[in-house]
Image (spheres, helix red, strand yellow):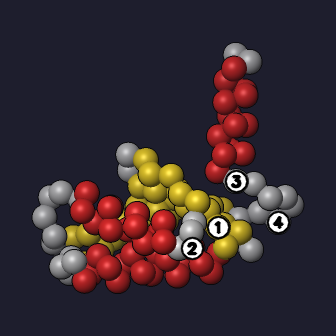
Amino acid sequence: MKVLIDLCLVPLGGGMSLSKYVAACHEIIKAAGLKHQLHANGTNIEGDYDLVFQTVKKCHERVHEMGAPRIHTNIKMGTRTDRSQTMADKMDSVTQKLSKS
């Protein structure tokens, strides 16, 4: 099954700047071969359900290894069985509707 998630992983106790943790997770997601899109408050990820969540686990493990004693993570996720849909498909649908207004 395919899944689209919006991942927001927040290390606690590791300082104010989060960019080094974001960069580390980005490398893990990229190495997994998952389609992803960084945005201001997280990362959108699409792919096989099991691979996506194995990758989220690896991100948690890496951020802990980097010294963050706690992590708070928010995940919004969606799955569909009626058809295949990518992040790009969803964005294109909205863009088309906006161009008509």
Asked if disc 2 and disc 4 are in contact, CB closer than 8 Å, the reply is no
Sequence-first tag of 3 and 1: 1
Q: Position of residue 19 (x, y in %)?
A: 25, 57
Contact flag, marks 3 and 1 (Cβ < 8 Å): no
Report, in whole angstroms, how far the alpha carbon at label 3 lies from the one at label 1: 9 Å
Q: How crowded is mark 2: few (under 14 residues within 10 Å), some or many (20 or more)?
A: many
Amino acid marked by disc 2: Val
Give coordinates of residue 65: x percent, y percent.
25, 83
Look at label 4 and name its amino acid: Thr
Using the image as rendered, state which of residue 66 and residue 31 is in the foreground.
31
Asked whether the beta carbons under mark 3 and mark 2 sit within 8 Å of each other, the answer is no
Amino acid under label 3? Thr
Residue at 15% from the left image edge and 58% from the top image edge: 16
**Mark 3: few, some, or many residues within 10 Å (few <14, many ≥20)?**
some
Residue 96 x, y percent position in the rendering: 73, 28
Label number found at residue 81? 4
- Res. 14 mark: none
State how many labels appear: 4
Kindly identify the residue that appears in the image at 36 percent across and 78 percent down: 60
N-term mark: 1 or 2: 1
Q: Are marks 1 and 2 in contact (CB under 8 Å)?
A: yes
Q: In which quarter of the image is residue 9?
A: bottom left
23 displayed left or right of 82: left
Q: Of tags 3 and 4, which is closer to the observer?
A: 3
How crowded is the residue under tag 4: few (<14 C-alpha within 10 Å), some, or many (20+)? Answer: few
Instruction: Residue lying at the far left in this picture: please name it.
Output: 15
The residue at which mark 1 appears reads as 47
Q: Which residue matches tag 2?
A: 52
Q: Name the residue under label 3.
A: 86
Dot 3 or dot 4: first in sequence order is 4
